[in-house]
Every structure is written in C-alpha cells, then in structure tokens.
Image (cartoon, rainbow, N blue to C red):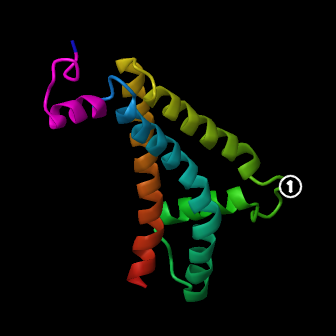
Amino acid sequence: MSQLESGGTMNEIQSEKRCGRCCGCGRSGAAIFAALVWLIQPAFLCLAVPKFIQRFQDLGVALPTLTRTVVDASRWLTGSVPGHSVTGIVFALPVFVSIGVTAAALAATRNATARRASCLFTATGAILLGMQVAAVLVPALRL
C-alpha cells in the first residue's frame, strides 16, 4: 500500500514521487548528465582549445606535457595537423556520442549494475573533461 492510499502527509507523498520508484525522475537527471559529459568534450576540444592555442603561440612559452597533449588532440580533431587528409572528429565524434548515449541508457535502467556502470562512464568522462580544462586553463592563467 502506497503512502497516497494510506493518506500520508503531502511531504511523504512528494518524497515517494521523487524517489525514482514510480516515474524514474531520479534517474533522468543522471542520464542527461552522463550524455552531456561525453558530448561536451569534443565541443571543448574543437571550439575552445584552438582559441587558447593561438594565445599560447603568440606568447611563445613552453607548455607542460599535459597541455601539449590536449593541444595535439584538439589539432587532430579539428584537422589542423599537416599531412592528415581526414579530420579526427570523423572518427572521434561517433565514439564520444556512443559512450554518452550508452551511459545515458544505463543510467535510465532499473538495474543497479547498469547504473553503476553508468556512474563509472560518467565519472571517467568528467575526470577526462576536468583534466582537459585544467590542462588548458592553468597555463593560460599563469601567463
């Protein structure tokens, strides 16, 4: 018997609705976040990093290894590496989208193991994105 049938208080009824057992509302936010984490990464690498690359080149400073790695990944994705005929985004975007959609689908299930896998995908994406942002912003702030 649910709280609604037993005449529970309004707060008890609302907490039952938000718990995720009846409408899945508790999982939709996780699914959206999982997809966004993986979809923001190629956008960051293709749109934001090239602006920082120009700033770094103008100043002529030596960059840390992690920053150079992010810059190289951005150049590969945007196709600004000499000698490459196909941009990396052609290969990388389907991978990022697939991981994001998979993580979102796993987050939306009722299976606890699938939700844990979604959390792992999402955490990995968030850590990678955080490292990419830090690798570009920290040297930029020091200049």
Q: Would you say 116 lies left or right of 129 here?
A: left
Q: Residue at (83%, 60%) from the top-left corner?
A: 83
The x and y percentages for residue 27 are 39, 33
- Residue at 78% of width from left, 54% of height from top? 87
Residue 60 in percent (x, y) is at 56, 85
- Residue 3 counted in the magenta span: yes
Quadrant into which the C terminus falls: bottom left
Indicate whether 6 appears above or below 82.
Answer: above
Instruction: Find numbered disc 1 in the image and state the secondary structure of the residue it sits on.
Output: loop
* Residue 103 or residue 1, whichever sits in front: 1
Q: Residue furthest left?
A: 9
Q: Residue at x 22, y 23 (%)?
A: 4
Which of 140/97 is in front?
97
Q: Residue furthest right?
A: 85
Query: Where residue 2 appears, x then y in whole percent?
Result: 22, 17
Q: Which image quadrant is residue 101 in?
A: top right
Q: Where residue 74 sits: x, y (%)? A: 63, 61
**Residue wearing tag 1:** 85
From the viewer's perspective, is residue 26 above or below residue 62? above
Looking at the rendering, which quadrant does residue 109 occupy? top left
The quadrant the N terminus occupies is top left
| Farthest bottom residue in view | 59
Mark 1 Cα-neighbour bin, 10 Å: few <14, some 14–19, many ≥20: few
Q: State whether residue 76 is above or below residue 118.
A: below
All told, the count of numbered labels is 1
Quarter assignment of residue 77: bottom right
Determine whether, in the image, residue 28 is placed left or right of residue 88. Answer: left
Q: Nearer the viewer, residue 95 or 143?
A: 95
What kind of residue is marked 1? Answer: Ser
Residue in front for this viewpoint, 33 or 132? 33
Q: Is residue 123 magenta?
A: no
Highlighted magenta segment, given as a residue range = 2-18
